[in-house]
Image: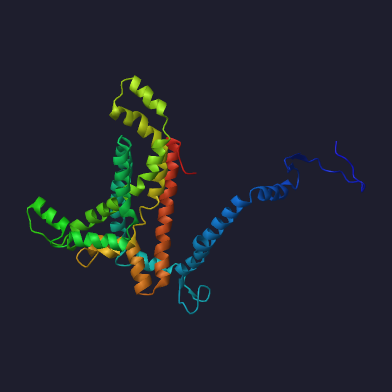
Amino acid sequence: MAEINKKGKKKTDKKQYRGYIVGKHAFFHNLWVDIRRNKVLYIFLVIILVYFGIFHYAPMVGLVMAFEKFTPIKGFFGSKWIGLQNFRQFFTGPYIGRLIKNTVIIGVLDLLVNFPAPIIFALLLNEIRLKAFKRSVQTISYMPYFISSVVAMGLVVGFTKSGGFISEWVARMTGGSSQNLLNSSKWFRPIYILSGTWQSVGYGSIIYLAALSSVDQELYDAAKVDGAGRVRQCLHVTIPGITPMIIMMFIMRMGMVFSVGADKILLLYNASNYDVSDVINTYVYRVGMLDSNFGLATAVGLFNSIIGTIMLMTSNFILKKTTEVSMF
């Protein structure tokens, strides 16, 4: 029964457990108790929230430029509002077909080649039993990821120019003469995709190696008892064990198909391969940084982000229905 205090009001029943209570105003009391007990964790949480707030959410105010004829002097809220005119200019422009085509082709090729490459590499590393050799291969494979894109693409340009290592190798394989491969439209996409493989295959395999370490070893023992060899163990134990991680990474990768990075392309493309190398992000760079049309650049970037979000949500929904594994 509820007790009656001196003023004649009923006291609410509150159950306590190690300082936590249950009642009408329990949330704020329990939060304060938890903060006092886990000060360090909450400090780290505040730092993370401040970081995301400053560098990820505050800049979203700039999206208003997509609907304005933006001028830096007048600012975000003083520039002329023009509605969807920037979007109309982009969709009716002469480059829309080439930009979307090149973005889709490069994005899909990158997905087909560079998504499974780290998985295959991790599976191969997992089969190596000599630990010293395995660690050496891992270390060497990680190195290209930590090289600056400018330096890495400088090496690619040097290797693919006339007389370069790759150009000479291609000339021997095809029976032709050594030439600058980046001056040919047919070679730009393979060079771009394979340079991405070289840079990311080692670093990208880390998460799959971590997933492989969590596979139950008893499953391998049971497979050996059943007479399964290394290949069958890989197909029926290893791959199913890391399938949830593969699905999660695939969903995130689908959201980046349209986000073909402009940095590498800007370092590799030229007038000779422009027809196959110009993508949405390079167009945003030209319009925004070179032509100072910030409104149009923001509109195109917003369109690109919306498409990426739609692809992420769609792939997550489909895989959730078919595999019961999803991000959310």
> Which of these two is toward me, 222 or 190?
222
Q: Is residue 270 above or below residue 191?
A: below
Residue occupying the point 36% across, 32% down: 238
Residue 98: x %, y % from top left: 28, 61
Color style of the picture = rainbow
Q: Is residue 153 above or below residue 318?
A: below
Asked if residue 88 lies left or right of residue 10, the reply is: left
* Residue at the bottom extreme of this rendering: 73
The reply to whether residue 279 is in sight is no
Residue occupying the point 22% across, 58% down: 188
> Which of these two is toward me, 164 or 56?
164
Residue 102: x %, y % from top left: 28, 58
Q: Quadrant of residue 104?
A: bottom left
Q: Quadrant of the N terminus?
A: top right
Residue 29: x %, y % from top left: 73, 49
The reply to whether residue 318 is in sight is yes
Asked if residue 79 lies left or right of residue 163, the reply is: right
* Residue at the top extreme of this rendering: 226
* Residue at the front extreme of this rendering: 132
Q: Quadrant of residue 86?
A: bottom left
Residue occupying the point 33% across, 54% down: 145
Residue 297: x %, y % from top left: 39, 68
Tally of marks: 0
> Which of these two is toward me, 269 or 89?
269
Residue occupying the point 39% across, 36% down: 212
